[in-house]
Image (cartoon, helix red, strand yellow):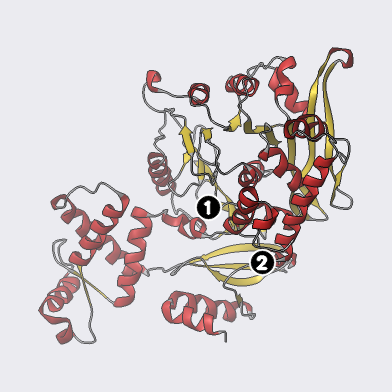
Amino acid sequence: MDDELEHAFERNPHLKEHYYNFIDEVGDPPEFLVSLSRDLGKIKYPNILYPVGDPIFVHIYGDENEGTVKYIGIEPRLDDKGEKKYLRVMDAILERAPNEPIPNTEDELKETILKLLDESVTIEGETIEEAGKEGRKSVISSILGGSIGEKIRLTPEEYDTIHYLIVRNIIGSGPLEPVIRDPYLEDIHSIGVESVFIVHKIFGMMQTNITFGTRAALDDWLRSMSERIGRPVSESTPIADGALPDGSRINIIYSDDVSRRGSSFTMRKFADIPVSIIQLINWGAIDVNLAAYMWICLENGMSIFFSGETASGKTTMLNACLPFVNRKHKIYSVEDTAEVQPPHAVWQQLITREQGPPESHVDMFTLLKAALRSRPNYIIAGEIRGVEGAVAFQAMQTGHPVLATFHASAVKKMIQRLTGDPINVPVTFIDNLNIAMILQAVYRKGDFLRRCISVEEIEGYYEEAGGVVTRAVFQWDPASDVHHFRGLNNSFILENKIADKLGYEDKREIYEDLFLRARILQRMREEGIEEYYDVLKVIWEFQEKGIDGLSIPI
């Protein structure tokens, strides 16, 4: 047996119990992996275990007979006797809590709860004599039923499990703790009490073994989460949307009246460390030439919209491209929910406020106007939906480049939405936007993929052409899964905007700059440099010192 698994068994008896119970029922032992690779997605019926932080583990099991793949969260559990002790411990903590100072932070709350836990219980020794006088009192108390004020006697295993469950339920994410901790998840969705599904980065959509038990428990959890994001739900205000402390975005639909199958929620997880541009290249979302094109455009202050349908990877692509912006630039981001993650030292992060009396609300329109007064080098609008779009185009017109995400599946549809209600950008202003990157989630040969399907340059509005003229510089071929550089020696932005700005007599020299950056990106791939901050270091080395300052040979 693998040494890592043996050590995990020693620390986590519940994992060992699950492992051998599974073998007894199914026969095949799961493979224990400390980390997962994307190649595992090729396995139709996986059977793997992996840790997401003691004491939680995840078991992905594909059942060939049923034709399903299930997501099983493994965490410490209590039997009926232990559940009764857990409830007594919680009562004891609540009885002692009024005597403690009010905690001001989550860390202080956790410290207070654990202090009260230790004051409320005593842990069994090997014998009653070893447990001491307090232990004897607790044993007698437990036999007779006891009162809340007396210490509850626990075995070491019960103490560890109750300790975990108290922290999980009060400080953590309750029954969702396994999926919240799992770094390989993108999306969590629940409809009612039993139907908790996840979208795994490697294995796709799966149903979990997670349950809230009762509708009342689910409603309590949703109210707690809504209070954490500062947007409490109730029967009168059943819908809330916001960001949790870990950066995950949650949308809550509360009340059976609105959600007929029971209260529901969707949670989109965001990693602490963004996906890097090299990872996106390795995954096939873009290629090195397309990434180099984005590099040279962002380096030279072009305005770009990352457009696509829901879950197409817009924000992921935007974050991956931000290291291309000059490290010395002042960045302002304006969002409803915090999602963009610029690595720059001078970054002002502005978030809308929707709660409280109407006069205290702050919307994206207001924040964008405030950002303009601060003379940023780049403005990032988290998502353009309404009248703030007109302000974004005014910003571009006054020389402030803008990056934004946008919901539209093609450039033509993007322009239609921008020029129609409620955004109402005059069609003659559209050429203030330089580039549109169109992203899409696609199924190709049974695999779920995210791809940049095109990059189009906005050339301008021509009355004689009857509208806005765009030029496709990159196009994805779904048959071969290859990106074609249609704009080679034919790019309006590279030749007429950036080459002019840089003072090239021969505008075609700009393509040499592009291919140099493509070589740097390719060398990072060959050297196995793909983690976000390692990639950032190389990009900023080149910005600062040029090719001679690179830590990798080109």
Q: Is residue 368 above or below residue 76?
A: above
What amino acid type is highlighted by mark number 2? Ser
Place of residue 404 in the rendered image (x, y in percent of width and height, measured from the top left): 63, 33
Who's the residue at 40% across and 49% down the image?
217
Residue placed under numbered mark 2 in the picture? 37
Give 126 or 552, whichever is nearer the viewer.
552
130 left or right of 390? left
Give 493 or 159, whichever is nearer the viewer.
493
Place of residue 529 in the rendered image (x, y in percent of width and height, measured from the top left): 66, 62
Place of residue 55 in the rendered image (x, y in percent of width and height, measured from the top left): 43, 69
Residue placed under numbered mark 1 in the picture? 194
Who's the residue at 53% across and 30% down the image?
376
Of labels 1 and 2, earlier in sequence is 2
* Structural distance between the alpha carbons of marks 1 and 2: 30 Å
The label shown at residue 267 is: none
What amino acid type is highlighted by mark number 1? Glu
225 left or right of 552? left
